[in-house]
Amino acid sequence: MNRNESARFPRSAPAPPSRRTIRIGLIGVGTVGTGTIRVLVEHRRELERRLGCRLELKKICSRSIHRKDISWIGQPVETTADWKQVVRDPEVDIVVELVGEPKTALAIARAALDAHKHLVTANKQLVAEHGLELVEHAAAARVSLGIEACVAGGMPILHAIREGLSGEHFRAVYGILNGTTNYILTEMEQRCCSFREALREAQAAGYAEPDPTMDVEGYDARYKIAILAMISFGQAVEVGEIPVEGITRISQIDFAYAHQLRRTIRLIATARRSSGGRLEAFVRPMMIPADGPFAGIHGATNGVLLVGNKGGNTLITGRGAGGEPTGVAVLSDVVEIAREMVRSQASLARRPDRRRPQAGTSVLGYAHWHRAKLAPSGESVIRTYLRLVVRDRPGILARVSGIFARHHINIDSVLQEPNHPKRRLPFVMTLEPGREKHVAQAVAEIARLPFLAEPPLTMPLAELP
């Protein structure tokens, strides 16, 4: 390196002076709140190098703050049990809302935006049910809204759709969006254990709540696919209109049959364009090819498959749960908002006569919206896996086959694992492609047959792109 090059590229350049301090008020010190604070404390120097300004945790709020040991933060920080004190603090620039209770989260969000505070939230139900309202409210208040942590924890899926793939016209989005259910299903498959055993292990490992209903019944994934549909298609979906089916009826025997079919089982959340400008959206367990993109996603990992019109398929995987991975996503929003604040400050310094610049309002990816029209349920043509558990007697196959024949549904194959008791004998039929509502009608009729030991179980034999 010559002398001129040394002058242009000094070995050690002094850090630029901090332009300002941006102060954060954090509400909710549970798993995600604690993880966010830890990431902020441990990554502070790196974050400030990225920003060129200082980030300060000004105030934290928890209803049980008096019982929490926060000495590990290692710096003075104000505490309160009243979230309104965070929102009203004139020195707080960004409110980070990390409470679990939906009504409280909505009250905090509205109050923060009314107070012209930038807002970051990780509450998927809040965004799925009130996303458009919050976007419009933030635009009117000329502040920013961050929601990256709402869908897949530390995976930057919303940023990828909104920014990196904004030139794409998406045809579909498929997701493994719940780490609890994916952990349970992969444990059942790999260790040949029951659903209840895998659930207990998930709870012991901290992947499942004491009451796992939101996860195992698919409701958590339903909120997330509603958000992904909004940001992928520019259509607001009513969460309650999305059909949902959980994994509680999946048995280890279903994995045995899946392997015979060279498949595995995952809980898949789906949103895709249908005919006539409609959307099809649902959450349900599916039998997917063992060599497909989702089959290798194990444990508490999440994955999202984006199907584009021009760019093809994009698969993004990563840790979708946990305090610190989600904290990374929360702080990514904080950094993005802080950058906008620094730019706005510089712009005002150059042009003091200008009114305050409007913050970015495309957090959901579109400037113009319409309400989604969902395709009627049951119109899709699918191949079907049907598992029956019967009290064995002569004529069972004839009765079941006769019902399918009356509904004009063709049987593709019949499978039966050996060494099961006659009083609870499982066997499987795979059905050729047929309209889902016709299959459902036939299965409802089969469910009334007197020899069934439990209700039938159906899953689509899905061929994901």
Image: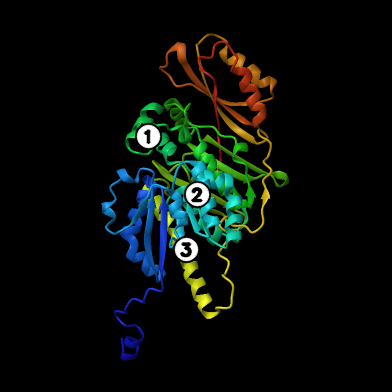
Mark carried by residue 165? none
- Which of the two labelled residues, at mark 3 and mark 2, occupies the earlier sequence position? 2
2 vs 1, front mark: 2
Residue beneath the point at 41% across and 53% down: 26
3 vs 2, front mark: 2
Q: Name the residue under label 2.
A: 108
Q: Name the residue under label 1.
A: 187
Residue beneath the point at 35% across and 34% down: 203
Where 206 falls versus 306 (above or below)?
Answer: above
Mark yes or no: residue 155 visible: no
- Which of the two labelled residues, at mark 3 and mark 1, occupies the earlier sequence position? 1
The 10 Å Cα crowd at callout 2, few under 14, some 14 to 19, many 20 or more, is many
Q: Position of residue 185 (x, y in %)?
A: 42, 34
Q: Position of residue 274 (x, y in %)?
A: 67, 44
- In terms of secondary structure, where does tag 3 sit? helix
Residue beneath the point at 39% across and 43% down: 63
In the picture, measured across the screen, residue 408 lies left or right of residue 114, that is: right
Residue beneath the point at 30% across and 43% down: 67
* Mark 2 residue type: Ile
- Which of the two labelled residues, at mark 2 and mark 1, occupies the earlier sequence position? 2
In the picture, measured across the screen, residue 352 lies left or right of residue 260, that is: right
Q: Name the residue under label 3.
A: 336
CA separation in Å, label 3 and label 2: 21 Å
- In terms of secondary structure, where does tag 1 sit? helix
The 10 Å Cα crowd at callout 1, few under 14, some 14 to 19, many 20 or more, is many
